[in-house]
């Protein structure tokens, strides 16, 4: 899972509001006070800008008419008051779709992981996964070092003091069992002294 970016173009009030609570986000905010500056960054090939989701007002015709921008990357806001929760939900859904479309198929060890259909496959065998199982696999794939139960609890579950550590262990156990039963593979997720690793 690579870092995702959200460019806010020509909407300084929105940027200021979101910047105050940016510690809550799994994405990084980028502010562009005017559309020209944003388009210059796009022309310059700034990779973070090119792959970012773009938020702007519905009447930003300069941006909407630009041939440099893929309109599928734009979230248009009308001139009305949005609840922050609703707006963040809209942004997160947009980023999830963008990520899934960009990475619909991943290779992990000798398996193919399809993020859209939530299946893992190997040699003509397919196994359906839950959303949480997908999250676990993607999180462990991203890390080079073994990940502790606490780390999984914080990063995958979004730690809650009410979540018991055996919840994480139970999910890992069930996922390992499903993979072993379907693919006869005992070593897809390794249990090491300092945590779990793919």
Image (spheres, rainbow, N blue to C red):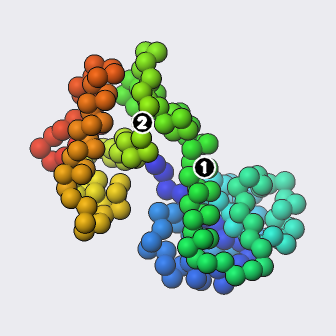
At label 1, counting other C-alpha atoms closer than 10 Å, the crowd grade (few under 14, some 14-19, many 20 or more) is some
At label 2, counting other C-alpha atoms closer than 10 Å, the crowd grade (few under 14, some 14-19, many 20 or more) is some
Residue that protrudes farthest toward the left in the picture: 193
Seen in the picture, residue 45 relative to 18 is either above or below; the reply is above
Residue under the image location 83 percent in, 62 percent down? 64
The image shows a total of numbered marks equal to 2
Q: Position of residue 134 (x, y in %)?
A: 41, 42
* 84 lies left or right of 189: right
Residue under the image location 63 percent in, 53 percent down? 51
Q: Position of residue 60 (x, y in %)?
A: 83, 71
* 138 lies left or right of 186: right
Question: Which of the 4 quarters of the picture holds residue 100?
Answer: top right
Label 1, secondary structure: give it.
Answer: helix
Q: Position of residue 89 (x, y in %)?
A: 57, 65
Residue under the image location 28 percent in, 19 percent down? 184
**Residue nearest the observer in this picture, 146 or 185:** 185
The quarter of the rendered structure image containing the C terminus is top left
Q: Which residue is mark 1?
A: 97
**Residue nearest the observer in this picture, 26 or 81:** 81
Of labels 1 and 2, the one closer to you? 2
Label 2, secondary structure: give it.
Answer: loop
The tag earlier along the polypeptide, 1 or 2, is 1
**Residue nearest the observer in this picture, 88 or 140:** 88
Can residue 34 be seen by looking at this rendering?
no
Q: CA distance from mark 1 to mark 2?
A: 18 Å
Residue under the image location 64 percent in, 66 percent down? 7
Q: Which residue is mark 2?
A: 129
Residue that protrudes farthest toward the top in the picture: 123
**Residue nearest the observer in this picture, 74 or 126:** 126
């Amino acid at each position: 899972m690579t870092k995702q970016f959200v460019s806010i173009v020509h909407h300084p009030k929105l940027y200021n509001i979101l910047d105050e609570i940016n510690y809550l986000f799994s994405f990084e905010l980028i502010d562009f006070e005017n559309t020209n500056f944003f388009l210059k960054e796009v022309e310059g090939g700034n990779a973070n800008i090119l792959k970012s989701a773009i938020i702007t007002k519905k009447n930003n015709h300069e941006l909407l008419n630009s041939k440099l921008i893929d309109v599928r990357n734009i979230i248009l806001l009308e001139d009305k008051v949005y609840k922050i929760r609703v707006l963040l939900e809209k942004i997160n859904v947009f980023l999830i779709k963008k990520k899934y479309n960009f990475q619909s198929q991943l290779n992990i060890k000798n398996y193919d992981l399809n993020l859209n259909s939530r299946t893992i496959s190997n040699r003509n065998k397919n196994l359906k996964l839950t959303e949480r199982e997908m999250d676990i696999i993607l999180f462990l794939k991203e890390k080079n070092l073994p990940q502790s139960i606490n780390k999984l609890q914080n990063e995958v579950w979004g730690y809650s003091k009410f979540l018991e550590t055996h919840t994480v262990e139970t999910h890992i156990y069930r996922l390992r069992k499903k993979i072993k039963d379907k693919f006869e593979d005992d070593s897809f997720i390794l249990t090491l002294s300092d945590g779990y690793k793919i």
